[in-house]
């Protein structure tokens, strides 16, 4: 189980002084169905006196575009900036395939990450004991797996300018030609701060870190490696390894347990974390936390918590989506934004126990297990907490 690393401790705010304002942004597709389970859990925790969360809601993604022509409104951005933690569902779907590029559902998510300064994305991939058979890999390869991908989230090719498509006119065969440009940019400070987070994380876990880049073809990878090595030299208690990102993808499916923490850039982190997710049985199991720098006065970090999976339009509205990654993302909020480590452990244990009982949503269904819908899974987790 993840522990709260030292650097995340708030120095000036004690728990009982801490406000507990959440902004729920359910988004599109299965977002509202899985968020409903988090709301139910929050209501239960509030009622039992364990928490005192105040909830506000907003729109993001396609539903926001439908409501006001933007993937997130300025009002909802303002709410996100003011609250203690954003709990985010998922965005996107075929319905919005043809909206302007800067208004596509994903633009709302990227604006939240950028404007809140959430540069550190923590994606733990833990294989629950009951699920080692659910992975596409052999059980002995994934049993007991506990790795953490630390993905840089506000830089790189996601945000680099220019980002354009230019008309080039016709070629000699009369065929229209265009040129598309994405830009990969990293500055030293961006690499340094994410590397520091990753080393701090490694210190609370297996004390081993891999940094993944493509320095063999990308000059930004050369700088990435140079800066990470500098940080490594200040963190000699952590075993440091460089790995090329393609080899990392291969090693993740060959022998994932060789890894403890993997730090990597925005794009490689996106890809490697999907692979890591599937090792655990299903994308429906993987939570994530996105954190900003600590506030200079309060010590509090801006934060957003979201499942790694997407909006799954193919199963939206059917009430069959697995809410575990969404609930586990809320648990990360308890841990990292509110310092409620014991409560977080309790909810994590409830998830483990429900899975051990053989309850499964469709994505992780196995022979001899009982199939549960979204609500049933949420109810079962709350029932465990009641016991
Ligand atoms: C993720 C998602 C997002 C990303 C999409 C929805 C923009 O795949 O969080 O991994 O690419 O970062
Ligand atoms: Mg992704």
Image: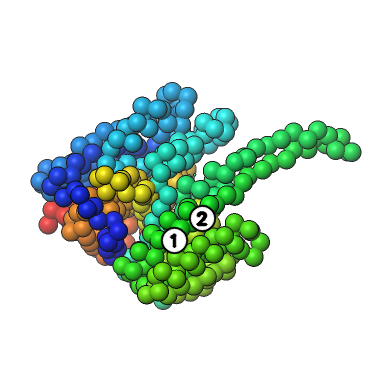
Q: Is mark 2 within 8 Å of ligand 1?
A: no
Q: Is mark 1 within 8 Å of ligand 1?
A: no
Does residue 58 appear to the left or right of 155 in the view shown?
Answer: left
Q: Which mark is residue 188?
A: 2
Of the pair 321 and 65, the residue shown nearer to us: 65
Q: Position of residue 360 (x, y in %)?
A: 32, 57
Q: Position of residue 333 (x, y in %)?
A: 28, 50
Does residue 64 appear to the left or right of 248 in the view shown?
Answer: left
Name the residue located 37 percent from the left edge and 75 percent from the top edge.
Answer: 237
For marks 1 and 2, give the one nearer the viewer.
2
Of the pair 364 and 152, the residue shown nearer to us: 152
Residue under circle 1?
A: 195
Q: Quadrant of the N terminus?
A: bottom left
Name the residue located 46 percent from the left edge and 31 percent from the top edge.
Answer: 71
What is the crowding at mark 2: few (fewer than 14 residues within 10 Å), some, or many (at least 20)? few
Q: Position of residue 202 (x, y in %)?
A: 37, 67
CA–CA distance in space, label 1 to label 2: 10 Å
Q: Quadrant of the C terminus?
A: bottom left
Residue 374 seen anywhere in this rendered image of the structure: no
The relative height of residue 171 versus residue 192 in the rendered view (above or below) is: above
Name the N-terminal-most of marks 1 and 2.
2
- Residue 279 position by quadrant: bottom left
Q: Which mark is residue 45?
A: none
Name the residue located 53 percent from the left edge and 52 percent from the top edge.
Answer: 187
Of the pair 45 and 371, the residue shown nearer to us: 45
Number of labelled discs?
A: 2
Classify mark 1: helix, strand or loop. Answer: helix
- Residue 347 position by quadrant: bottom left
The relative height of residue 319 versus residue 76 in the rendered view (above or below) is: below
Classify mark 2: helix, strand or loop. Answer: helix
Indicate the colouring scheme. Answer: rainbow
Q: Position of residue 24 (x, y in %)?
A: 31, 38
């Amino acid at each position: 189980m993840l522990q709260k690393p030292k650097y995340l401790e708030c120095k000036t705010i004690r728990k009982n002084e801490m406000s507990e304002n959440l902004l729920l942004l359910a988004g599109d597709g299965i977002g509202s169905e899985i968020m409903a389970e988090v709301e139910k859990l929050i209501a239960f925790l509030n009622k039992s006196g364990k928490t005192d969360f105040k909830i506000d809601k907003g729109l993001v993604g396609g539903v926001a575009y439908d409501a006001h022509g933007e993937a997130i409104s300025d009002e909802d951005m303002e709410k996100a900036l003011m609250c203690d933690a954003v709990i985010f569902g998922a965005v996107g779907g075929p319905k919005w395939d043809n909206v302007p590029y800067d208004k596509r559902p994903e633009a709302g998510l990227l604006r939240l990450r950028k404007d809140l300064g959430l540069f550190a994305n923590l994606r733990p991939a833990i294989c629950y004991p009951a699920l080692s058979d659910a992975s596409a890999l052999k059980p002995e390869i994934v049993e007991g797996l506990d790795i953490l991908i630390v993905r840089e989230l506000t830089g790189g090719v996601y945000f680099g300018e220019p980002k354009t498509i230019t008309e080039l006119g016709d070629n000699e065969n009369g065929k229209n030609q265009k040129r598309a440009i994405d830009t990969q940019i990293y500055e030293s400070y961006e690499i340094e701060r994410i590397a520091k987070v990753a080393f701090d994380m490694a210190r609370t876990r297996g004390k081993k870190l891999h940094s993944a880049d493509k320095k063999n073809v990308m000059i930004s990878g050369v700088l990435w490696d140079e800066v990470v090595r500098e940080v490594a030299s200040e963190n000699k208690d952590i075993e440091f390894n460089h790995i090329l990102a393609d080899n990392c993808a291969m090693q993740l499916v060959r022998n994932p347990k060789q890894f403890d923490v993997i730090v990597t850039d925005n794009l490689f982190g996106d890809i490697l974390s999907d692979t890591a997710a599937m090792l655990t049985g299903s994308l429906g199991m993987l939570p994530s936390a996105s954190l900003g720098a600590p506030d200079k006065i309060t010590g509090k970090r801006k934060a957003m918590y979201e499942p790694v999976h997407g909006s799954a339009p193919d199963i939206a509205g059917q009430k069959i989506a697995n809410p575990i990654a969404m609930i586990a993302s809320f648990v990360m909020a308890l841990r990292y934004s509110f310092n409620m480590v014991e409560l977080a452990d309790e909810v994590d244990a409830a998830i483990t126990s429900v899975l051990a009982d053989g309850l499964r949503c469709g994505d992780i269904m196995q022979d001899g297990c009982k199939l549960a819908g979204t609500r049933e899974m949420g109810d079962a987790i709350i029932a465990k907490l009641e016991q």
